[in-house]
């Protein structure tokens, strides 16, 4: 077993949590679940597979994950981030077992490729594979950046390397669940985009850099995206993904994915942002009060 703790955030993930944990057991038995008071069998399944579970009220992903880092019951050299609907391929588990113990001391972070499965289809085009994410890092050398959406691990020191094999993002829920989830994501995305303009609080994030790591490049592009006029950017983004990045090669299921994730979701974000401006205008304090009254979210927390 490797000296690594895997941290997973959960809320009603009984369909996924067993699959996720079982994929981790070939290289670690140190699994820490931070649960937001699930009402299904998530906790029961996790504990039956040997995971430690702590309960914490949900505010946003970054705060919940940093709670997991600070309250990790295992004093391991390495930490790993997983979502409940993800799992590690056997080849990646083997790669972790073969390489983690002898890792050079100056390596603090490890990037892993994520493949997305949608309607049982591997989405390979549209810029969606490979997606490199820092999922393993030295304990004490990284935190989750404090954004409302698209949170990444921010390293304090050390260099990074890449592993060659994949983890898989594969939800077993239906399309209604998916669209409802992305409706909630859209609120967080609006907050994140507005925060670029208004800086609601002094957040610790990765540095934007077009030529840097994937998360640095993504932060840079998000700042640029925020400056594009409403309702034009989802159209441009979809056309870029579907045609220039060859998303059309993903077939019918890929068409559904790229329309929903690459256009509908982005359009919904812009519509919700338009609603904010329509309701309260451009005043920062009024926007903060709007999100507090309408969504129960304190942007300055």
Image (tube, grey):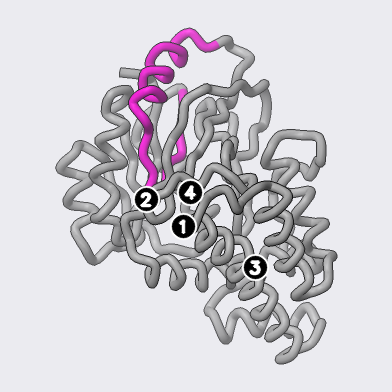
Q: Is residue 241 magenta?
A: no
Label 2: element kind: loop
Which residue is identified by label 2?
Answer: 120
Q: Are the residues at dot 2 and dot 3 in contact (C-beta closer than 8 Å)?
A: no
What residue is drawn where x is 72% and y is 65%? 193
Quarter containing the N terminus: top left
Instruction: Note whether 190 is above or below 169 in the view shown.
Output: below
Which residue is identified by label 4?
Answer: 65
Which residue is identified by label 1?
Answer: 253
Q: Which mark is residue 80?
A: none
Label 3: how many residues lie within 10 Å, few (<14), some (14-19) or many (20+)? many
Q: Nearer the viewer, residue 130 or 146?
A: 130
Between disc 4 and disc 3, whose residue precedes? 4
Q: Which mark is residue 266?
A: 3
Label 3: element kind: helix
Q: Which residues are magenta?
A: 78-103
Left of 68 or right of it: where is 234?
A: right
């Amino acid at each position: 077993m490797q000296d690594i703790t895997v941290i997973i955030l959960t809320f009603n993930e009984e369909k996924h949590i067993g699959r996720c944990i079982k994929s981790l057991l070939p290289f670690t038995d140190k699994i820490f679940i931070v649960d937001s008071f699930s009402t299904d069998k998530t906790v029961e399944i996790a504990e039956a597979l040997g995971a430690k579970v702590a309960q914490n009220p949900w505010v946003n992903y970054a705060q919940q994950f940093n709670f997991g880092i600070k309250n990790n019951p295992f004093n391991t050299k390495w930490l790993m981030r997983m979502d409940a609907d993800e799992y590690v391929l056997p080849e990646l588990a083997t790669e972790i077992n073969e390489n983690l113990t002898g890792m050079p001391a100056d390596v603090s972070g490890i990037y892993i490729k994520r493949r997305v499965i949608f309607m049982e289809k591997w989405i390979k085009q549209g810029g969606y594979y490979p997606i490199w994410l820092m999922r393993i890092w030295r304990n004490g050398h990284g935190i989750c950046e404090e954004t409302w959406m698209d949170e990444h691990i921010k390293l304090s020191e050390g260099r990074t390397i890449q592993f060659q094999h994949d983890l898989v993002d594969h939800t077993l829920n239906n399309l209604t669940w998916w669209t409802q989830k992305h409706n909630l994501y859209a609120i967080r995305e609006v907050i994140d985009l507005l925060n670029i303009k208004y800086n609601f609080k002094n957040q610790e994030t990765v540095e934007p850099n077009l030529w840097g790591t994937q998360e640095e490049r993504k932060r840079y592009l998000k700042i640029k995206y925020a400056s594009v006029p409403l309702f034009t950017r989802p159209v441009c983004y979809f056309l870029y993904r579907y045609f220039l990045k060859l998303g059309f090669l993903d077939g019918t299921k890929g068409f559904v994915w790229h329309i929903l994730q690459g256009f509908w979701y982005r359009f919904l974000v812009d519509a919700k942002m338009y609603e904010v401006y329509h309701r309260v205008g451009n005043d920062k304090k009024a926007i903060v009060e709007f999100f507090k009254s309408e969504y129960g979210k304190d942007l300055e927390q």
